[in-house]
Image (tube, rainbow, N blue to C red):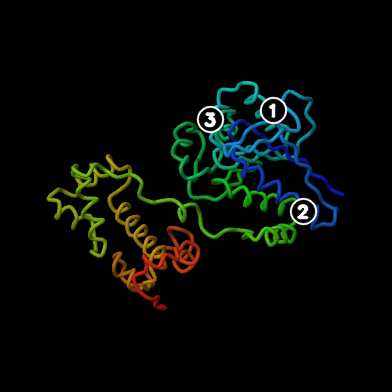
Amino acid sequence: MRKITVALLVFPRFQMLDIAAPSDAFAEVKVLSNGECEYEILTIATTRGPIQSSSGLTITPDRTIFDPAPHFDTLIVPGGLGVFELLEDTPLIDWLLQQGENCRRVGAICNGVFALGAAGMINGKTVTTHWMDAARLSTMFRKANVEPDRIYVKDDALYTTAGVTAGIDLSLALIEEDFGKKMALDVAKYLIVYLRRAGGQSQFSPLLELQAETDSPVGAIQGYVLANLDVEHTLPSIAEKMQMSERHLSRIFKQECGMTLMTFVNDARIDAVRRHLEATDISLTEIAKRCGFTNAATLRRVFAKRLGIGPIDYRERFKTDDPVQKNSKAEKV
């Protein structure tokens, strides 16, 4: 029997699903292999007492970081509200660094990557995290290359993931590495999840979070664009509308919003398409017309390129069944 030992770090206010989901995925390997393959799961903490998760559920760790440590093949650090309290915990950070040198691979789920960052383990590495924490991660650890749209990223022996349920994606990837694609697929089927999810985090996160003050020149530009998405906007046309030079318009927009004007226009169109797909049954042809795309084919192409998933698949995944929000019967295109 082949056994792989996995250490799961726990700390006050950790995300329970970040350790429960991988544990359940790993446990199925023994069941589905009839005992020929197995993951041994050990929870590790800085104290022997019960540790309360962010949901209020508690777990009693198997051992502490101060115990003589067996060899861990894999170390996984979950995320959670309490992860930021670990960043100045010198004994824990030193332990993480030591384990990083001894383990075959190290993974972080959601914002657990911040703990690895404090240990210097993501310097020069490509990583990801939950989309809400990506900007903060980039700011705090400038030597890391943060890719905010990825579900999970492997960089040599370092694995990082997006939020919460992405721990399942990571677990399936590790199972495939250890025991082959068939085993990973069988586990995915048992858990009723995709072996590999289509698209990145952009399908879940809003594209337009940065909004200027409504009474500022840039706020007026944003308001005009958002109210007229069906218009064919260009930098010259908007500059003329706002009675500004193109150079001045580009400069103040980028300075205040952190993105170019045309990036804003394109993201505004995609966000509007998403709202129609989520809340209405109107056709892609009509959505394309309302959101400023030439036709449905162009909408499909641009949408899939930006979000990594087609509009039809997106509608099937995210559409509400609230009849109040429906505008009309669906038209196939």
**Location of the C terminus (image quadrant):** bottom left
In percent of width and height, residue 250 lies at 24, 46
Q: What residue type is labelled 3?
A: Phe
Q: Dividing the picture into quarters, in which one does residue 47 lie?
A: top right
**Mark 1 secondary-structure assignment:** helix
- Decide: few, some or many residues near mark 1? Use Cα within 10 Å; few <14, some 14-19, many ≥20: few
Residue 182: percent from left, percent from top: 74, 61
Q: Which of 136 and 50 is in front in this view?
A: 50
Instruction: Give the image location of residue 37, x and y in percent.
Output: 82, 51
The answer to which of marks 1 and 3 sits earlier in the sequence is 3
Q: Name the residue under label 1.
A: 98
Which residue is situated farthest in the right direction here? Answer: 1
Q: Which mark is residue 84?
A: 3
Q: Quadrant of residue 183?
A: bottom right
Residue 316 in the image: above or below residue 248:
below
Tell me the element at label 3: helix
Residue at mark 2 to residue at mark 1: CA–CA distance: 28 Å
